[in-house]
Image: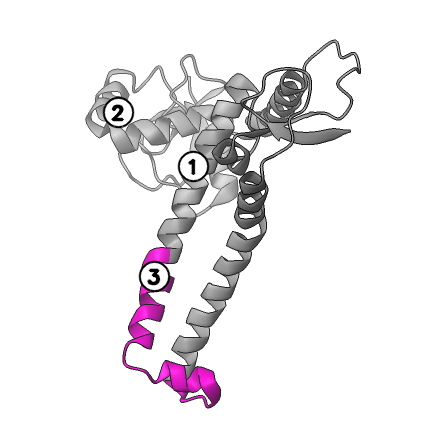
Protein backbone atom coordinates (compact mmCIF):
# COMPACT_ATOMS: atom_id res chain seq x y z
CA UNK A 1 0.00 0.00 0.00
CA UNK A 2 2.98 2.33 -0.34
CA UNK A 3 4.74 3.87 -3.29
CA UNK A 4 7.85 5.98 -3.77
CA UNK A 5 7.43 9.73 -4.11
CA UNK A 6 9.75 12.69 -4.37
CA UNK A 7 10.81 13.75 -0.90
CA UNK A 8 10.88 17.44 -1.86
CA UNK A 9 7.09 17.29 -2.06
CA UNK A 10 5.68 17.45 1.48
CA UNK A 11 1.97 17.21 0.71
CA UNK A 12 -0.32 14.18 0.88
CA UNK A 13 -0.39 13.74 -2.89
CA UNK A 14 2.34 11.57 -4.32
CA UNK A 15 4.69 13.02 -6.88
CA UNK A 16 5.99 10.48 -9.43
CA UNK A 17 9.72 9.95 -9.54
CA UNK A 18 11.70 11.63 -12.25
CA UNK A 19 13.34 9.53 -14.93
CA UNK A 20 16.81 10.20 -13.53
CA UNK A 21 15.65 9.16 -10.07
CA UNK A 22 14.33 5.86 -11.42
CA UNK A 23 17.55 5.18 -13.29
CA UNK A 24 19.65 6.09 -10.25
CA UNK A 25 17.49 3.82 -8.06
CA UNK A 26 18.11 0.95 -10.49
CA UNK A 27 21.85 1.64 -10.52
CA UNK A 28 22.20 1.89 -6.73
CA UNK A 29 20.04 -1.09 -5.76
CA UNK A 30 20.63 -3.51 -8.66
CA UNK A 31 23.53 -2.59 -10.92
CA UNK A 32 26.03 -1.47 -8.26
CA UNK A 33 25.77 -4.61 -6.03
CA UNK A 34 25.88 -6.84 -9.11
CA UNK A 35 28.92 -4.96 -10.46
CA UNK A 36 30.80 -5.32 -7.16
CA UNK A 37 30.17 -9.07 -7.10
CA UNK A 38 31.27 -9.47 -10.72
CA UNK A 39 34.41 -7.35 -10.29
CA UNK A 40 35.38 -9.26 -7.14
CA UNK A 41 34.95 -12.58 -8.93
CA UNK A 42 36.90 -11.32 -11.95
CA UNK A 43 39.78 -10.06 -9.79
CA UNK A 44 39.97 -13.37 -7.94
CA UNK A 45 39.90 -15.26 -11.25
CA UNK A 46 42.69 -13.09 -12.63
CA UNK A 47 44.86 -13.79 -9.62
CA UNK A 48 44.19 -17.54 -9.80
CA UNK A 49 44.71 -17.57 -13.58
CA UNK A 50 48.04 -15.78 -13.25
CA UNK A 51 49.19 -18.25 -10.56
CA UNK A 52 48.04 -21.42 -12.36
CA UNK A 53 48.62 -20.35 -15.96
CA UNK A 54 45.00 -20.88 -16.94
CA UNK A 55 44.14 -20.73 -20.64
CA UNK A 56 41.37 -18.88 -22.44
CA UNK A 57 40.75 -15.18 -22.62
CA UNK A 58 40.92 -14.87 -18.82
CA UNK A 59 44.29 -16.58 -18.80
CA UNK A 60 45.52 -14.30 -21.58
CA UNK A 61 44.26 -11.28 -19.65
CA UNK A 62 45.87 -12.55 -16.45
CA UNK A 63 49.24 -12.80 -18.20
CA UNK A 64 49.20 -9.10 -19.02
CA UNK A 65 51.79 -7.21 -16.98
CA UNK A 66 49.27 -4.85 -15.41
CA UNK A 67 46.47 -7.37 -14.65
CA UNK A 68 47.84 -8.94 -11.42
CA UNK A 69 48.65 -5.57 -9.87
CA UNK A 70 45.21 -4.19 -10.74
CA UNK A 71 43.53 -7.31 -9.30
CA UNK A 72 45.52 -7.04 -6.07
CA UNK A 73 44.74 -3.32 -5.80
CA UNK A 74 41.03 -4.01 -6.20
CA UNK A 75 40.88 -6.93 -3.76
CA UNK A 76 43.13 -5.51 -1.06
CA UNK A 77 42.54 -1.76 -1.34
CA UNK A 78 39.49 -0.61 -3.27
CA UNK A 79 36.90 -3.27 -2.39
CA UNK A 80 37.52 -3.27 1.42
CA UNK A 81 37.52 0.54 1.56
CA UNK A 82 34.38 0.82 -0.56
CA UNK A 83 32.64 -1.73 1.65
CA UNK A 84 33.65 0.05 4.85
CA UNK A 85 32.55 3.40 3.44
CA UNK A 86 29.17 1.97 2.48
CA UNK A 87 28.69 0.41 5.92
CA UNK A 88 29.59 3.66 7.72
CA UNK A 89 27.32 5.76 5.50
CA UNK A 90 24.46 3.27 5.93
CA UNK A 91 24.88 3.36 9.72
CA UNK A 92 24.86 7.18 9.80
CA UNK A 93 21.82 7.25 7.52
CA UNK A 94 20.05 4.76 9.78
CA UNK A 95 20.74 6.87 12.87
CA UNK A 96 19.36 9.92 11.08
CA UNK A 97 16.31 7.89 10.14
CA UNK A 98 15.73 6.95 13.78
CA UNK A 99 15.73 10.64 14.64
CA UNK A 100 13.63 12.05 11.81
CA UNK A 101 11.70 9.05 10.45
CA UNK A 102 12.49 9.97 6.83
CA UNK A 103 14.74 8.09 4.35
CA UNK A 104 14.84 4.56 5.73
CA UNK A 105 17.75 3.51 3.50
CA UNK A 106 20.91 5.17 2.24
CA UNK A 107 19.76 5.00 -1.38
CA UNK A 108 16.50 6.78 -0.50
CA UNK A 109 18.47 9.56 1.18
CA UNK A 110 20.85 9.93 -1.76
CA UNK A 111 18.03 10.05 -4.31
CA UNK A 112 15.66 12.20 -2.25
CA UNK A 113 12.71 9.79 -2.38
CA UNK A 114 10.35 8.57 0.31
CA UNK A 115 7.54 6.08 0.78
CA UNK A 116 3.98 7.47 0.90
CA UNK A 117 0.58 5.83 1.07
CA UNK A 118 -0.77 4.85 -2.32
CA UNK A 119 -4.18 6.33 -1.47
CA UNK A 120 -3.79 10.00 -0.41
CA UNK A 121 -7.40 10.15 0.77
CA UNK A 122 -6.90 7.33 3.28
CA UNK A 123 -7.16 8.60 6.84
CA UNK A 124 -4.16 7.81 8.99
CA UNK A 125 -3.99 8.83 12.61
CA UNK A 126 -0.19 8.57 12.57
CA UNK A 127 2.18 9.36 9.71
CA UNK A 128 4.02 6.47 8.12
CA UNK A 129 7.46 7.84 9.02
CA UNK A 130 6.52 7.86 12.70
CA UNK A 131 5.20 4.29 12.51
CA UNK A 132 8.39 3.06 10.82
CA UNK A 133 10.52 4.72 13.46
CA UNK A 134 8.45 3.26 16.32
CA UNK A 135 8.61 -0.23 14.83
CA UNK A 136 12.41 -0.08 14.53
CA UNK A 137 12.79 1.32 18.04
CA UNK A 138 10.56 -1.46 19.38
CA UNK A 139 12.68 -4.05 17.60
CA UNK A 140 15.88 -2.58 19.01
CA UNK A 141 14.46 -2.40 22.53
CA UNK A 142 13.32 -6.04 22.41
CA UNK A 143 16.75 -7.06 21.16
CA UNK A 144 18.48 -5.15 23.97
CA UNK A 145 16.08 -6.56 26.57
CA UNK A 146 17.03 -10.05 25.39
CA UNK A 147 20.78 -9.51 25.17
CA UNK A 148 21.45 -7.20 28.15
CA UNK A 149 20.69 -9.78 30.90
CA UNK A 150 23.24 -12.10 29.27
CA UNK A 151 26.03 -9.51 29.61
CA UNK A 152 28.02 -9.26 32.82
CA UNK A 153 28.12 -5.49 33.04
CA UNK A 154 30.45 -5.51 36.04
CA UNK A 155 33.01 -7.64 34.26
CA UNK A 156 32.65 -5.56 31.12
CA UNK A 157 33.22 -2.34 33.03
CA UNK A 158 36.24 -3.80 34.78
CA UNK A 159 37.75 -5.07 31.52
CA UNK A 160 37.34 -1.67 29.84
CA UNK A 161 38.77 0.14 32.85
CA UNK A 162 41.70 -2.28 33.03
CA UNK A 163 42.53 -1.79 29.35
CA UNK A 164 42.02 1.98 29.15
CA UNK A 165 42.93 3.12 32.68
CA UNK A 166 45.29 0.51 34.17
CA UNK A 167 46.78 2.83 36.80
CA UNK A 168 43.37 3.92 38.06
CA UNK A 169 42.26 0.29 38.15
CA UNK A 170 45.26 -0.77 40.22
CA UNK A 171 44.79 2.17 42.59
CA UNK A 172 41.12 1.35 43.12
CA UNK A 173 42.01 -2.31 43.70
CA UNK A 174 44.61 -1.38 46.32
CA UNK A 175 42.21 0.98 48.09
CA UNK A 176 39.34 -1.52 48.18
CA UNK A 177 41.20 -4.83 48.27
CA UNK A 178 39.07 -6.12 51.16
CA UNK A 179 35.73 -4.46 50.57
CA UNK A 180 35.28 -4.97 46.82
CA UNK A 181 35.29 -7.99 44.53
CA UNK A 182 38.39 -8.33 42.39
CA UNK A 183 36.37 -9.49 39.38
CA UNK A 184 33.25 -7.32 39.25
CA UNK A 185 34.33 -4.47 41.56
CA UNK A 186 31.03 -4.52 43.49
CA UNK A 187 30.92 -3.48 47.13
CA UNK A 188 29.54 -5.01 49.30
CA UNK A 189 30.29 -8.42 47.83
CA UNK A 190 27.73 -11.18 47.37
CA UNK A 191 28.76 -14.15 49.56
CA UNK A 192 32.36 -12.96 49.98
CA UNK A 193 35.10 -15.57 49.71
CA UNK A 194 38.86 -15.35 50.10
CA UNK A 195 41.28 -17.13 47.78
CA UNK A 196 44.53 -18.84 48.69
CA UNK A 197 46.40 -15.68 47.57
CA UNK A 198 44.53 -13.65 50.21
CA UNK A 199 42.23 -11.53 48.03
CA UNK A 200 38.45 -11.30 48.29
CA UNK A 201 35.84 -12.01 45.62
CA UNK A 202 32.15 -12.68 45.19
CA UNK A 203 31.39 -16.38 45.40
CA UNK A 204 29.54 -16.39 42.08
CA UNK A 205 32.27 -14.40 40.27
CA UNK A 206 35.04 -16.75 41.36
CA UNK A 207 32.86 -19.82 40.89
CA UNK A 208 31.95 -18.86 37.32
CA UNK A 209 35.61 -18.23 36.51
CA UNK A 210 36.56 -21.68 37.78
CA UNK A 211 33.72 -23.29 35.86
CA UNK A 212 34.94 -21.71 32.62
CA UNK A 213 38.61 -22.58 33.20
CA UNK A 214 39.07 -24.76 36.31
CA UNK A 215 42.89 -24.94 36.23
CA UNK A 216 43.88 -21.52 34.94
CA UNK A 217 42.11 -18.83 36.98
CA UNK A 218 44.44 -15.92 37.68
CA UNK A 219 43.84 -13.41 40.45
CA UNK A 220 43.12 -9.99 38.90
CA UNK A 221 44.92 -8.25 41.78
CA UNK A 222 48.20 -10.18 42.03
CA UNK A 223 48.06 -12.34 38.86
CA UNK A 224 48.73 -15.53 40.83
CA UNK A 225 46.87 -18.72 39.99
CA UNK A 226 43.95 -19.39 42.31
CA UNK A 227 43.97 -23.00 43.52
CA UNK A 228 41.34 -22.90 46.25
CA UNK A 229 39.13 -20.51 48.19
CA UNK A 230 37.02 -20.40 51.34
CA UNK A 231 34.35 -18.25 52.87
CA UNK A 232 35.60 -14.96 54.31
CA UNK A 233 35.22 -14.61 58.04
Q: Is residue 208 above or below residue 49?
A: above
- Residue nearest the viewer, comparing 170 with 103: 103
Figure colour scheme? one colour
SS for callout 2: helix
Left or right relative to 95: residue 138:
right
Q: Which residue is mark 1?
A: 89
User: Of all residues shown, which one is farthest toward the top?
Assistant: 125
Which of discs 2 and 3 lies nearer the camera? The answer is 3
Q: Position of residue 52 (x, y in %)?
A: 41, 87
Counting residues from the N terminus, which is met first, the one under dot 2 or under dot 1?
A: 1
* Location of residue 186 in the rendering, given as x and y in whole percent from the top left corner: 41, 17
Q: Which numbered disc, 2 or 3, marks the residue that appears first in the sequence?
A: 3
User: Which residue is tagged 3?
Assistant: 76
Q: What residue range appears in magenta?
A: 51-78
Give the structural element (helix, strand or loop) at label 1: helix
Q: Main secondary structure of the magenta part?
A: helix
In this figure, which residue is indicated by the disc labeled 2? 169
Amino acid sequence: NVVYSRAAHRGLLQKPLLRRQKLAFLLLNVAWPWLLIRLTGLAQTLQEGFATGEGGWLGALARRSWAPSVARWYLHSFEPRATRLQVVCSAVSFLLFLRSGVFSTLSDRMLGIRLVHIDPSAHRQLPMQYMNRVMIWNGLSEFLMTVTPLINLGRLRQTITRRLFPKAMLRSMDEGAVGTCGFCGVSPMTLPVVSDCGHHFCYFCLGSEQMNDPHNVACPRCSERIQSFGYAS
